[in-house]
Amino acid sequence: MKTNIRIKMSPRAKKISKLLLNKYLFATVVFVFWIAFFDKNAFVTQWKLSRTIDKLQEEKSFLIEETEATRVLQKDIMTNKEKYAREKFFMKQPGEQVFIIK
């Protein structure tokens, strides 16, 4: 003895249920979901890598500026060794007095 239960559905609901039960659509949705979130080239991974690249480029430009500033300071130190020694290390020649004013 079989019991048949029939549910009345509107034509629109039938179209939606047929569309959702379509195996090709299901496979496509699963594939897109997999590529978007779980693959090694996923959108989230690519976004994180892009942020990392941006941070590294900012750090690179900062370090280039620091290198240039250091080169200028090095050139100044090499040309004015006595001035640098007197200002930074408070060195003096014999017989001189040094007054530190802050």
Image (cartoon, rainbow, N blue to C red):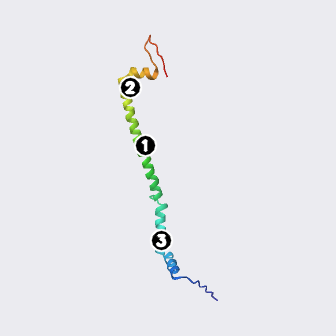
- Residue at (39%, 38%) from the top-left corner? 65
Tell which circle, 1 or 2, labels the residue nearer the N-terminal end.
Answer: 1
Residue 101: x %, y % from top left: 48, 20
- Residue at (46%, 70%) from the top-left corner? 28
Observer-nearest residue: 41 or 43?
A: 43
- Residue at (39%, 32%) from the top-left corner? 70
Instruction: Give the residue at mark 1.
Output: 59
Residue most extreme to the front: 102
Q: Quadrant of residue 87?
A: top left
| Residue 44 against residue 85 in the figure, above or below | below
Distance between mark 1 and mark 3 Cα atoms: 44 Å
Distance between mark 3 and mark 2 Cα atoms: 70 Å
Distance between mark 1 and mark 2 Cα atoms: 26 Å
For numbered disc 2, what is the local secondary structure?
A: helix
Of badges 3 and 2, nearer the viewer stands 2
Mark 2 closeness class: few <14, some 14–19, many ≥20 residues within 10 Å? some
| Residue 43 against residue 63 in the figure, above or below | below
Number of numbered markers? 3
Tell which circle, 3 or 2, labels the residue nearer the N-terminal end.
Answer: 3
Q: Amino acid at mark 1?
A: Glu
Instruction: Give the residue at mark 2.
Output: 77
CB atoms of marks 1 and 3 within 8 Å: no
